[in-house]
Image (cartoon, helix red, strand yellow):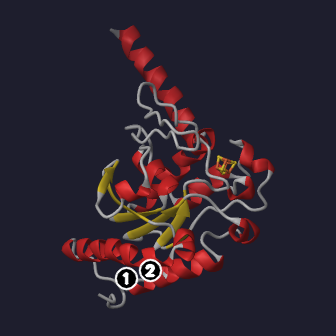
Amino acid sequence: MDDLRLLVGDLRRQLERHVRAGAWAARAGSPTRAAGPEVAVPVTEPSVDTPRRTLAQIRDELGECQRCKLHATRTKLVFGNGAEDAALMFVGEAPGADEDRIGDPFVGKAGELLDKMIEAMGWTRPTVYVANILKSRPPGNRNPQPDEVAACIPFLWAQIDAIRPRIIVALGRPAANGLLGRDAPISALRGRFHDARGYKVLPTFHPAYLLREPERKRDVWTDLKLVIVELDRLGIRSPHPPKT
Ligand code: SF4
């Protein structure tokens, strides 16, 4: 029995070392395989032993990250920004050219549209939190690849666990599938809440898609109104009245 206790203690310490190193994505037996070539293959289950870290600790842990091949082509790592205790969080797929140059998420035209969406909900960029599945830009804005998602998404989950948002809005297919561990079109996921590790996730279209297909803005507003109603039901008030 003493040997067994020693073995369990040893395994626990090994796991804690992996967690501190940010390398706990491959939890045995739990990955959800995705069928498509561009689809994320994240592990969405938390480790019960994962300590909650602050955003500053998570950023320190990332450092000048070289955990996947994207480090070789990025200009700036895009960690995420916003309120550290945000009730509402927005997650996209990856930095684009502007984000890569500046180091902040959702800048440029898609970022301006996201700001309008957030403001229509009665919030502002500094009162929510915005991040991506990947923190380095894929070359040519291609979709995230499974190995990149597997390397990077533990840090997003650590951010989510630090912030503990009441609702996460997943912007676009890669973000929604990455958070939910699914492989489904955004049209099949949007418009309702999903559970991801105990967090409420509402998928909707990405602002960059809305720039190309502006007629889908109506659908996004329908989705965002669900968020407004749910936040109200949870007793969370936005700083400004939403445009309902
Ligand atoms: S995408 Fe994520 S895992 Fe890959 S190099 Fe950038 S920060 Fe590291």
Residue position for label 2: 118
Q: Secondary structure at mark 2?
A: helix
The picture quadrant where one finds residue 243 is bottom left
Name the one closer to the observer, 20 or 192.
192
Left or right: 108 in relation to 227 = right
User: Is the CB atom of the residue marked by disc 1 within 8 angstroms of ligand 1's nearest atom?
Assistant: no
How many discs appear? 2
Q: Secondary structure at mark 1?
A: loop
User: Where does the image place residue 1, in percent across and percent down from the top left?
Assistant: 32, 8
Q: Contact (CB < 8 A) between labels 1 and 2?
A: yes
Give the answer, above or below, for where 74 lies relative to 212: above
User: Where does the image place residue 21, in percent across and percent down from the top left?
Assistant: 60, 39
Residue under the image location 44 percent in, 41 percent down: 50
User: Where does the image place residue 97, in percent across and percent down from the top left?
Assistant: 73, 67
User: Is the CB atom of the residue marked by disc 2 within 8 angstroms of ligand 1's nearest atom?
Assistant: no
Give the answer, above or below, for where 115 lies relative to 142: below
User: Where does the image place residue 223, in percent across and percent down from the top left?
Assistant: 33, 71
Residue 126 seen in render = yes
In three-dimensional space, the C-alpha distance between marks 1 and 2, rounded to whole angstroms, equals 5 Å
Q: Amino acid at mark 1?
A: Met
Name the one closer to the observer, 144 or 232.
144
Residue under the image location 43 percent in, 52 percent down: 185
The picture quadrant where one finds residue 6 is top left
Q: Amino acid at mark 2?
A: Ile
| Quadrant of image for the C terminus | bottom left
Determine which of the numbered discs, if any, sits on residue 105 in the image.
none
Residue position for label 1: 121
The picture quadrant where one finds residue 212 is bottom right
Residue 53 seen in render = no
Left or right: 27 in relation to 72 = left
Residue under the image location 74 percent in, 57 percent down: 140
